[in-house]
Amino acid sequence: MRKIFAKNLLDAASCGDTGVLDKIEPEPVAKEQKFPKNCSAEGSAFATLNLIRSFLGMVRDRVSANGLLAALPQADWARMRNDFEETHLARHTTLIEPGQRISIIHFPENCIVSTVAVMEQGGSVEMATTGCEGIVEVGAIIGSDTALSKYVVQVPGDALTIEYQTFKKWDREIPAFHKMLQKYMQAHVVHILQSVACNAAHTIERRAARWLLMAQDRSHGDSFLLTQEYFAEMLGVSRPVVSTIARAFQKAGLIKYARGKITIANRAALEEKACECYRVIKQVYDFHAIDC
Ligand SMILES: [Zn+2]
């Protein structure tokens, strides 16, 4: 890997200063972590470590926590890895706007990025969620050199990035990489189509449960940072509606919510609460052997 940009490190150092979170205590997580989690105390320690690495010119030697890259044959990854850079994505960063020329491709490792549709009156709603199973922007896979949609970081965390032209070169030259991207695209299209049906057919409560499960799957842990304001925006509802749902989920023991941090407390019960779309979307990614 090449050195980390100082800007990214500054983002990492400042991403907790949103006014929502005063201090977040690290908690043990149930899942194995390949990579330190999002913008918590662990994330700050990780950013500091990377800063030291950067100044010392150290090269990281690891398998990516992004599922697409981790699944590549070792020899292929060895050819590509020096073209990737490590970055930290701060919460609410807009990665790209519709129609904007694509210059960088992001491979999330433990952050979560929403594909959002922005309406004329200013509201927006999420169409898809991308984490460690995928890439941003997916239009690059089908040859588009401009963004098809708007992408916003909802849960801060880390990603690997590669320049668009270099991404295209490896897509042409490494069959396993090309095949992996095509499989991901197929699954992602089903994901978007199911989300369209979900937004029209299922209750806010069930959609909220689905989103929380997907966020947990993609963040390598039981806890992640999420403001109610942006959770409401993703679901296309008002903040009071989300507050009511969050209180009900917390009262039922499904989640814990404090100072912008959500912890999944009872996953089995949350799965019962979620709509069928969670299972449908997960199955299609599983079918294509795409996972974090
Ligand atoms: Zn649904």
Image: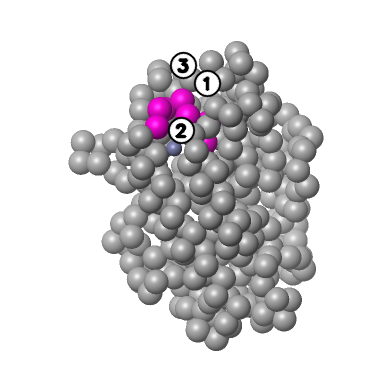
Q: Nearer the viewer, residue 93 or 66?
A: 66
Total numbered labels placed on residues in the image: 3
| Label 1 Cα crowd, 10 Å radius (few <14 / some 14-19 / many 20+) | many
**Lower position in the chain sequence, tag 2 or tag 3:** 2
Which dot marks residue 244?
3
The magenta segment is: 202-210
Name the spot of residue 94 as percent of width and height, x first: 42, 49
Measure the alpha-carbon separation of dots 2 and 3.
14 Å
Q: Quadrant of residue 29?
A: top right
In the image as oriented, which residue stretches furthest toward the top?
A: 251
Residue 44 appears left or right of 140: right
The verdict on label 2 being within 8 Å of ligand 1 is yes
Check disc 3 and report its element: helix, strand or loop.
helix
**Which mark lies nearer to you, 2 or 1?**
2
Q: Is residue 53 magenta?
A: no
Q: Are marks 1 and 3 in contact (CB under 8 Å)?
A: yes
The residue drawn where x is 75% and y is 48% is: 33
Which dot marks residue 207?
2
